[in-house]
Amino acid sequence: MSRDFTPHWLWETAGRWVHPRRMPETLLLRLARERALSFAEIARRADPPTSQQQVERLAKGARALDAEWGLRLGPALAVAPQDLVEGRIKRVRLELAIASAFSEARPAQFELPPEEREWIEAPRGLERKEECFAALVADDSAAKLYPKGSILFVRRLPEAGASL
Protein backbone atom coordinates (compact mmCIF):
# COMPACT_ATOMS: atom_id res chain seq x y z
CA MET A 1 0.00 0.00 0.00
CA SER A 2 1.54 3.31 -1.02
CA ARG A 3 0.65 6.59 0.56
CA ASP A 4 0.32 9.80 -1.34
CA PHE A 5 2.39 12.53 0.36
CA THR A 6 1.55 15.18 -2.17
CA PRO A 7 1.23 18.52 -0.34
CA HIS A 8 -2.14 20.21 -0.40
CA TRP A 9 -1.80 23.71 -1.73
CA LEU A 10 -3.94 26.49 -0.31
CA TRP A 11 -4.03 29.39 -2.69
CA GLU A 12 -2.31 30.95 -5.63
CA THR A 13 -0.14 34.02 -5.06
CA ALA A 14 1.59 35.93 -7.85
CA GLY A 15 1.29 33.01 -10.24
CA ARG A 16 2.59 30.27 -7.94
CA TRP A 17 0.96 28.01 -5.43
CA VAL A 18 1.81 28.45 -1.74
CA HIS A 19 1.94 25.57 0.73
CA PRO A 20 0.48 26.19 4.23
CA ARG A 21 3.89 25.67 5.89
CA ARG A 22 5.32 28.45 3.75
CA MET A 23 2.46 30.81 4.49
CA PRO A 24 3.62 34.17 5.90
CA GLU A 25 2.47 34.70 9.51
CA THR A 26 0.64 38.02 9.32
CA LEU A 27 -0.44 39.83 12.47
CA LEU A 28 -4.07 39.37 11.44
CA LEU A 29 -3.60 35.61 11.12
CA ARG A 30 -1.75 35.41 14.47
CA LEU A 31 -4.44 37.42 16.29
CA ALA A 32 -7.22 35.30 14.78
CA ARG A 33 -5.47 32.12 16.00
CA GLU A 34 -4.61 33.47 19.46
CA ARG A 35 -8.14 34.75 20.07
CA ALA A 36 -9.80 31.72 18.49
CA LEU A 37 -11.71 33.94 16.06
CA SER A 38 -12.87 32.62 12.73
CA PHE A 39 -12.47 34.74 9.62
CA ALA A 40 -16.28 34.86 9.48
CA GLU A 41 -16.44 36.31 13.03
CA ILE A 42 -13.80 38.94 12.23
CA ALA A 43 -15.72 39.81 9.03
CA ARG A 44 -18.92 40.30 11.07
CA ARG A 45 -17.11 42.50 13.63
CA ALA A 46 -15.54 44.71 10.92
CA ASP A 47 -16.98 48.20 10.53
CA PRO A 48 -18.57 48.09 8.00
CA PRO A 49 -18.84 44.30 7.86
CA THR A 50 -17.08 42.46 5.07
CA SER A 51 -16.90 38.92 3.72
CA GLN A 52 -15.13 35.95 5.26
CA GLN A 53 -13.21 35.49 2.00
CA GLN A 54 -11.90 39.06 2.13
CA VAL A 55 -10.62 38.64 5.70
CA GLU A 56 -9.02 35.33 4.72
CA ARG A 57 -7.19 36.99 1.80
CA LEU A 58 -5.92 39.75 4.10
CA ALA A 59 -4.89 37.29 6.83
CA LYS A 60 -2.97 35.06 4.45
CA GLY A 61 -1.21 37.93 2.71
CA ALA A 62 -2.95 37.37 -0.62
CA ARG A 63 -4.22 40.97 -0.43
CA ALA A 64 -2.41 43.96 1.05
CA LEU A 65 -3.76 45.18 4.37
CA ASP A 66 -3.79 48.96 3.84
CA ALA A 67 -4.85 51.85 6.08
CA GLU A 68 -8.51 51.52 5.11
CA TRP A 69 -8.55 47.84 6.12
CA GLY A 70 -6.68 48.70 9.31
CA LEU A 71 -9.43 51.16 10.26
CA ARG A 72 -12.13 48.59 9.48
CA LEU A 73 -10.54 45.60 11.23
CA GLY A 74 -8.44 47.14 14.02
CA PRO A 75 -11.36 47.78 16.40
CA ALA A 76 -12.75 44.29 15.71
CA LEU A 77 -9.46 42.82 16.98
CA ALA A 78 -8.85 45.44 19.71
CA VAL A 79 -5.55 46.60 18.19
CA ALA A 80 -4.47 49.94 16.80
CA PRO A 81 -5.33 50.14 13.09
CA GLN A 82 -1.80 51.36 12.34
CA ASP A 83 -0.31 48.34 14.15
CA LEU A 84 -2.44 45.99 12.07
CA VAL A 85 -1.17 47.63 8.88
CA GLU A 86 2.47 47.64 10.08
CA GLY A 87 2.21 44.00 11.14
CA ARG A 88 3.36 44.35 14.75
CA ILE A 89 1.83 45.65 17.94
CA LYS A 90 3.48 48.80 19.28
CA ARG A 91 0.51 50.65 20.77
CA VAL A 92 -1.78 50.24 23.76
CA ARG A 93 -5.27 51.70 24.18
CA LEU A 94 -5.64 54.48 26.78
CA GLU A 95 -8.92 53.41 28.38
CA LEU A 96 -9.10 54.68 31.96
CA ALA A 97 -8.39 57.69 34.08
CA ILE A 98 -7.60 56.89 37.70
CA ALA A 99 -7.34 58.91 40.89
CA SER A 100 -5.73 57.20 43.83
CA ALA A 101 -3.96 58.03 47.05
CA PHE A 102 -2.67 54.46 47.33
CA SER A 103 -4.12 54.17 50.81
CA GLU A 104 -6.79 51.95 52.25
CA ALA A 105 -9.39 54.03 50.46
CA ARG A 106 -10.66 52.49 47.26
CA PRO A 107 -9.22 54.31 44.24
CA ALA A 108 -11.56 56.07 41.88
CA GLN A 109 -11.42 54.97 38.29
CA PHE A 110 -13.56 55.82 35.35
CA GLU A 111 -13.63 54.81 31.74
CA LEU A 112 -12.68 57.51 29.33
CA PRO A 113 -15.42 58.41 26.86
CA PRO A 114 -14.82 56.83 23.43
CA GLU A 115 -13.90 60.19 21.88
CA GLU A 116 -11.06 60.64 24.42
CA ARG A 117 -9.61 57.16 24.02
CA GLU A 118 -6.48 56.95 21.95
CA TRP A 119 -3.75 54.53 20.97
CA ILE A 120 -0.42 55.42 22.54
CA GLU A 121 3.04 54.04 21.92
CA ALA A 122 3.96 51.45 24.55
CA PRO A 123 7.40 51.46 26.16
CA ARG A 124 10.05 49.14 24.77
CA GLY A 125 10.25 45.84 26.55
CA LEU A 126 6.55 45.71 27.41
CA GLU A 127 5.62 42.16 26.50
CA ARG A 128 2.24 40.99 25.21
CA LYS A 129 1.06 44.52 24.45
CA GLU A 130 -2.18 43.11 23.06
CA GLU A 131 -3.12 42.09 26.64
CA CYS A 132 -2.48 45.57 28.08
CA PHE A 133 -4.27 48.86 28.37
CA ALA A 134 -3.14 52.26 29.62
CA ALA A 135 -4.52 54.36 32.47
CA LEU A 136 -4.02 58.08 32.93
CA VAL A 137 -3.35 59.39 36.47
CA ALA A 138 -6.01 62.12 36.67
CA ASP A 139 -5.01 63.94 39.88
CA ASP A 140 -1.98 64.55 42.03
CA SER A 141 -3.02 62.51 45.07
CA ALA A 142 -0.22 60.01 44.40
CA ALA A 143 2.26 62.69 43.30
CA LYS A 144 5.29 61.09 44.91
CA LEU A 145 4.90 57.91 42.85
CA TYR A 146 2.88 58.96 39.83
CA PRO A 147 2.36 62.69 39.18
CA LYS A 148 -0.79 63.90 37.51
CA GLY A 149 -0.63 63.08 33.81
CA SER A 150 1.46 59.90 34.25
CA ILE A 151 0.50 56.94 32.08
CA LEU A 152 0.39 53.50 33.69
CA PHE A 153 0.49 50.39 31.49
CA VAL A 154 -1.65 47.62 32.94
CA ARG A 155 -1.87 43.97 31.90
CA ARG A 156 -5.37 42.51 31.91
CA LEU A 157 -5.74 39.57 34.26
CA PRO A 158 -8.84 37.49 33.45
CA GLU A 159 -9.18 36.37 37.08
CA ALA A 160 -9.25 39.99 38.30
CA GLY A 161 -12.32 40.94 36.31
CA ALA A 162 -12.72 44.41 34.84
CA SER A 163 -11.27 46.47 37.71
CA LEU A 164 -7.66 47.55 38.00
Image (cartoon, rainbow, N blue to C red):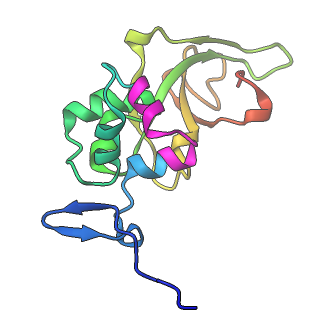
- Name the residue located 27 percent from the left edge and 54 percent from the top edge: 61
In this orientation, which residue lies closer to the viewer: 1 or 127? 1
Give the percent coordinates (x, y) of residue 102. 76, 23
| In magenta segment, residue 36 | yes
| Dominant secondary-structure state across the stretch colored magenta | helix
Q: Is residue 31 left or right of residue 84?
A: right
Q: Nearer the viewer, residue 94 or 6?
A: 6
Q: Is residue 65 left or right of residue 60?
A: left
Q: Quadrant location of residue 107?
A: top right
Residue 29: image x %, image y %?
42, 50
Q: Give the vertical position of 13 relative to 8 (above or below).
A: above
Q: Is residue 14 above or below residue 118?
A: below
- Residue 157 lies within the magenta run: no
Say if 74 sits above or below 57 in the image. Answer: above
At x 66% / y 35%, what residue is drawn?
156
Q: Residue furthest bottom?
A: 1
- Residue under the point 13% across and 66% down: 15
In the image, 152: left or right of 50? right
* Towards the viewer: 149 or 93: 93
User: Which of 38/2 is in front?
Assistant: 2
Q: Which image quadrant: the N terminus?
A: bottom right
x, y percent for residue 10 = 34, 62
Q: How many marks?
A: 0
Which quadrant of the view contains residue 39?
top left
> What residue is drawn where x is 39% and y is 33%?
120
User: Quadrant of the image for the C terminus?
Assistant: top right
Magenta segment: 32-45
At which x and y percent is residue 78? 47, 31
Q: Quadrant of residue 36?
A: top right
Decide if residue 49 is in sight here. yes
Identify the residue at the far left of this view. 15
Q: Is residue 152 visible?
A: no
